[in-house]
Image: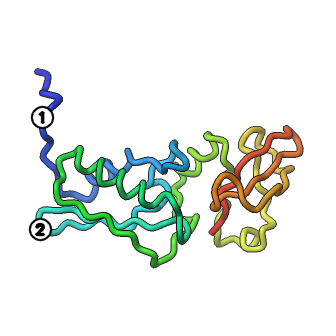
Amino acid sequence: MVSDPMQVLEPVYDEENVKKILEMVKDPEIPVLAIEDMGIVRDIEFEEGGVQVSIMPTYSGCPAMDVIAEDVRSALLLHGYKKIEVKTVLSPAWSSDFITDKGKKCLQEYGIAPPVSAGSKGAMLGIDPVGCPQCKSTNTRVVSEFGSTACKALYKCDDCLEPFDYFKCV
């Protein structure tokens, strides 16, 4: 029996269910990456028949936060949630270490070099080699400290000669 596509879904007040819904919400600046894989979702709470999702920016003043908040609301509304609060939190500060392994793989496949571990000594000094997402060479160099967004740097591979974004360690 085929269910009615206009049928209103009953929300399931369960953290794993909400996480599955949030996996459908993509980062507006990197559309192959879910906000869950970016580590932007910090907390999910349920209160008085509603859901509160806490999100954090990758850096202060990130222009994508309003879009992400609205996309979170829309995704939850589509799944039957009516009382929704999306809260932006600034502490603890986001770290590129919050990006999941799946997220790093998605970045690589999309053509953006994923960050090395922010906790590594080489990352803090900016000397860890950045691999080219096209040919995998580490014979790369910084062209500009800022790429297509403030959280990325522009690199160039000296082997395949392709430019690429590198997601900075924070």
In the rendered image, residue 11, in percent from the top left (x then y), is placed at: 16, 50
- Identify the mark nearer the N-term, 2 or 1: 1
At horizontal 54% and vertical 71% (from top left) the residue drawn is 60
Residue that label 1 marks: 7
Q: Residue 31's mark?
A: none
CA neighbours of label 1 inside 10 A, class few (<14), some (14 to 19), many (20+): few
The quadrant of the rendering that contains the N terminus is: top left
In the rendered image, residue 76, in percent from the top left (x then y), is placed at: 26, 51
Placement of 110 over or under 165, stated as above or below: above
Given residues 23 and 64, the one toward you in this image is: 64
At horizontal 47% and vertical 54% (from top left) the residue drawn is 37
In the rendered image, residue 168, in percent from the top left (x then y), is placed at: 67, 62
The quadrant of the rendering that contains the C terminus is: bottom right
Kind of residue at badge 1: Gln
State left or right for residue 157 relative to residue 68: right
Kind of residue at badge 2: Glu
At horizontal 44% and vertical 67% (from top left) the residue drawn is 56
At horizontal 30% and vertical 47% (from top left) the residue drawn is 75
Residue that label 2 marks: 48
Given residues 35 and 85, the one toward you in this image is: 85
